[in-house]
Image (cartoon, rainbow, N blue to C red):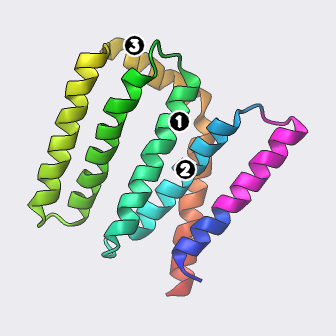
Amino acid sequence: MSNNHSIIIYLLIFIALSILLKIIGFINLLYIELAGYALIFYGIGTVYLSMGRQKRNLLFVGAVAFLIGIELFIMNNYDFLKLSNVVLPSIFFILGTAFLILFIDDLSNKLLLAISVIFLISGIFFFAKLGTFNLNDFLKSTLSISVKYWPVIIIVTALILLLKKNSKVKK
């Protein structure tokens, strides 16, 4: 079984357990937030297993999945005056970051860096035109999320260790 299949199996187990815990009433999350977590876990695992292995398509998909998961998480946990003002810049940031990860995987391909910079600058432009940004509020929010969701960090770490163990056993 390939490593990507292992990720999908772990992801399906995570989703099934999460839905079961939600139905039982043990956790109180919206399904959109569960989808966000699933995309975050899938993205981390896919990027981890694709990096440095000439699997650019999978690496790109993993990076985008992770960042969309983060986007769903943020949109679910914060109130935005106009959600449309967040979505457009986010698309550009997600694409720019995904291309940046592709560039980090293949430093000789400068075109990937140029594409990344164009998308990131476009995201900054749309963000500046459509919204406001306050560094102090951003840092407070980041700390608040970290304190509230530290178990997720532990689960992600466990997932990475499981995937690493699986890849070592197969070699």
Q: What residue is disc 3 on?
A: 137
Q: What residue is disc 2 on?
A: 39
Q: Earlier in the sequence, mark 2 or mark 1?
A: 2
Whether residue 157 is visible here, answered yes or no, is yes
The image position of residue 71, as x and y in percent, is 47, 36
Q: Residue at x 66, y 42 (%)?
A: 34
Q: Is residue 149 above or below residue 165?
A: above
The amino acid sitting under disc 3 is Asp
Q: Residue at x 66, y 63 (%)?
A: 10
Question: Does the residue at mark 2 contact the one at mark 1 (Cβ under 8 Å)?
Answer: yes
The amino acid sitting under disc 2 is Leu
- SS of the residue at dot 1? helix
Neighbor class of circle 3 (other Cα within 10 Å; few <14, some 14-19, many 20+) is few
The amino acid sitting under disc 1 is Leu
- SS of the residue at dot 3? helix
* Residue 84 lies within the magenta run: no
Left or right of 16: which side holds 43? left
Left or right of 103: which side holds 14? right
Magenta segment, which residues? 11-27
Q: CA distance from mark 2 to mark 1?
A: 9 Å
Q: Quadrant of residue 166?
A: bottom right
Q: Which mark is residue 58?
A: none
Neighbor class of circle 1 (other Cα within 10 Å; few <14, some 14-19, many 20+) is some
Q: Residue at x 29, y 39 (%)?
A: 92
Q: What residue is disc 1 on?
A: 72
- Work out which residue is located at the far right of the displayed protein and give it: 24
- SS of the residue at dot 2? helix
Q: Is residue 19 above or below residue 1?
A: above
Neighbor class of circle 2 (other Cα within 10 Å; few <14, some 14-19, many 20+) is many
